[in-house]
Amino acid sequence: MSLAVEHLGHVRREGYVVARDVLGPGEDLQPVVDEYAEVLDRRARRMYAADEIRRTCAKFPVVQCARRVTRRARPNSASPRRDGRR
């Protein structure tokens, strides 16, 4: 894929460019998702062993596991959650 002149201008102005249909969900993105899931699983098991969470993420989808782990990893965070609670 080559960038057109208007793409280069957009990169200079905005700092990014949207390249559609460059990555395929299976062959390009799935390995990244799989590796991220492994990292989350290891983190969740360490947190479980340290008694920081009540359950590992083995039965949860990646997105839900990520929410659980990051929420528990920052228990004193000053930033409110989307539902308004801290």
Image: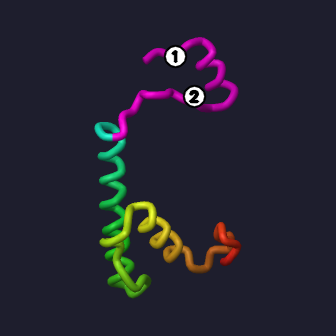
Going by the numbered disc 2, the residue's amino acid type is Val
Going by the numbered disc 1, the residue's amino acid type is Leu
The answer to whether residue 9 is magenta is yes
Q: Secondary structure at mark 2?
A: loop
Q: Residues within 10 Å of mark 2 (few under 14, many from 20)?
A: some
Which residue is painted at 31% across and 68% down in the image? Answer: 42
Residue matched to label 2: 17
Residue range corresponding to the magenta coloring: 1-25
Place of residue 66 in the rendered image (x, y in percent of width and height, measured from the top left): 45, 65
On residue 3, the disc is 1
Which residue is painted at 32% across and 72% down in the image? Answer: 59
Place of residue 17 in the rendered image (x, y in percent of width and height, measured from the top left): 57, 28
Place of residue 85 in the rendered image (x, y in percent of width and height, measured from the top left): 67, 77
Which residue is painted at 55% across and 13% down in the image? Answer: 4
Place of residue 82 in the rendered image (x, y in percent of width and height, measured from the top left): 65, 67
Compute the Cα span from label 2 to label 1. Answer: 9 Å
The answer to whether residue 71 is magenta is no
